[in-house]
């Protein structure tokens, strides 16, 4: 693949390497022969400009994947608006500005499909950015992500920096956050349905009405897309990354029940928020560039379930492995 030639022997910084996307990038880049640079939160707090600038000046990365962010599901976004806005704005401005100062050759900023208006025409095209009001349950995160992609555009225009941005749809996979309060729907339901199976519970609560539609992309597919864009795309517009297909939350919950082997019933709690009614990306642009996702949803769910039952072990609750999924408490990303 041409990406290998592009990054071979290069100094590649993955910001957010312990997160869902960052850890998939580490896996994907492992065989590319590049020098992968990472830094822990303790060594360099990405929300502190001075620390970021010092670390970047020291390490001199040539390529940067900006996958560091404060993330969370619908409830977390609603509960911690200040952290979602401040942390994400600070991380984006600090890294993008420092990348310009140290002469990074190319930077890829990770956004999110929630940057598009709540009632954007579906599937959502890149051009619908800033054409309408955002979904209120995650506007804090969305505003910071919009600022990040605008920074990439501004630094390209003013300084000629090759900074691009990718907008992934809802992600899931190994390395996800399984914390019951802050997780997104896939890990949340994997956990709840698994626990219900073990305890013999007759029903599982699913938030909302079950009717919202979402598109889900396996995170290793995303990592592949990001390397592809790093090699083949240099433009001002963000590029959507998704599968092009969506399903209802009810269908997702049923698929997860099949993967887990749970035969009880699903109870939809309409008092919990539905969030935006539909979120499907238009993926024509990345398709035209020559990239497509390959992991079928149910296979990806199975792989994620397998991961959390096995690999998550080192970060799991001690002594709890027999009764609960070992990766559950890996939680915070
Ligand atoms: P969103 O895509 O930004 O809305 O984020 P989420 O992944 O958190 O939620 C997606 C949809 O799944 C929303 O309609 C939620 O109400 C629904 N959902 C159902 N059960 C759960 C759950 O246990 N946790 C979460 N986070 N969402 C759930």
Image (tube, grey):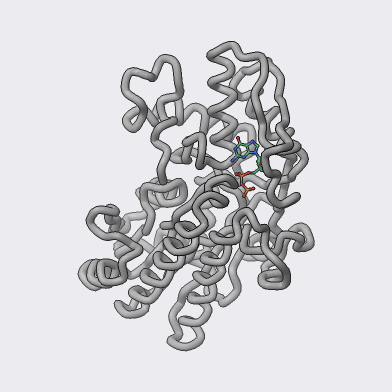
Q: Pick whichever, 13 or 139, lies toward us.
A: 139
Quarter of image, res 185: top right
Q: Say whether residue 9 is left or right of residue 205.
A: left
Residue 87: x and y in percent read 42, 61
Residue found 67% across the figure and 31% down from its top: 206
Residue 323: x and y in percent read 44, 15
Q: Say whether residue 34 is left or right of residue 194.
A: left
Q: Say whether residue 312 is left or right of residue 75.
A: left
Residue 107: x and y in percent read 43, 69
Quarter of image, res 122: bottom right
Quarter of the rendered image showing ligand 1 = top right
Residue found 62% across the figure and 58% down from its top: 114
Q: Is residue 188 above or below residue 281?
A: above
Q: Is residue 211 above or below residue 326?
A: below
Residue 148: x and y in percent read 50, 70
Q: Pick whichever, 156 or 133, lies toward us.
A: 133
Q: Residue furthest bottom?
A: 158
Residue found 45% across the figure and 46% down from its top: 20
Q: Say whether residue 3 is left or right of residue 103.
A: right
Q: Residue furthest left?
A: 58
Q: Evaluate whether residue 291 shows in this view.
A: no
Q: Evaluate whether residue 248 shows in this view.
A: yes
Residue found 41% across the figure and 43% down from its top: 332
């Amino acid at each position: 693949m041409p990406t290998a030639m592009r990054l071979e022997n290069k100094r590649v910084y993955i910001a957010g390497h312990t997160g869902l996307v960052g850890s998939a990038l580490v896996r994907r880049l492992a065989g590319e022969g590049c020098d992968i640079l990472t830094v822990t939160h303790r060594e360099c707090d990405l929300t502190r400009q001075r620390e970021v600038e010092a670390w970047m000046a020291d390490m001199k990365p040539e390529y940067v994947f900006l996958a560091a962010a404060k993330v969370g599901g619908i409830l977390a976004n609603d509960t911690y608006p200040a952290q979602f806005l401040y942390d994400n704005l600070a991380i984006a401005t600090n890294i993008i500005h420092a990348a310009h100062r140290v002469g990074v050759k190319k930077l890829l900023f990770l956004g999110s499909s929630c940057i598009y208006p709540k009632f954007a025409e579906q599937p959502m095209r890149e051009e619908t950015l800033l054409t309408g009001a955002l979904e209120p349950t995650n506007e804090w995160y969305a505003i910071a992500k919009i600022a990040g992609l605008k920074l990439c555009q501004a630094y390209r225009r003013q300084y000629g920096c090759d900074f691009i941005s990718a907008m992934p749809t809802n992600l899931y996979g190994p390395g996800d956050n399984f914390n019951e309060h802050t997780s997104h729907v896939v890990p949340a339901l994997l956990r709840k349905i698994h626990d219900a199976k073990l305890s013999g519970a007759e029903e599982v609560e699913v938030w909302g009405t079950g009717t919202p539609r979402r598109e889900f992309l396996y995170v290793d597919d995303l990592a592949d897309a990001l390397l592809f864009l790093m090699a083949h795309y240099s433009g001002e517009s963000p590029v959507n990354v998704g599968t092009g297909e969506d399903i209802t939350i009810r269908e997702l919950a049923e698929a997860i029940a099949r993967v887990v082997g749970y035969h009880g019933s699903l109870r939809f709690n309409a008092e919990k928020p539905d969030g935006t009614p539909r979120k499907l990306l238009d993926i024509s642009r990345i398709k035209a560039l020559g990239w497509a996702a390959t992991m079928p949803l149910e296979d990806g769910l199975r792989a994620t379930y397998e991961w959390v039952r096995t690999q998550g072990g080192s970060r799991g609750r001690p002594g709890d492995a027999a009764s609960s999924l070992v990766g559950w408490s890996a939680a915070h990303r």
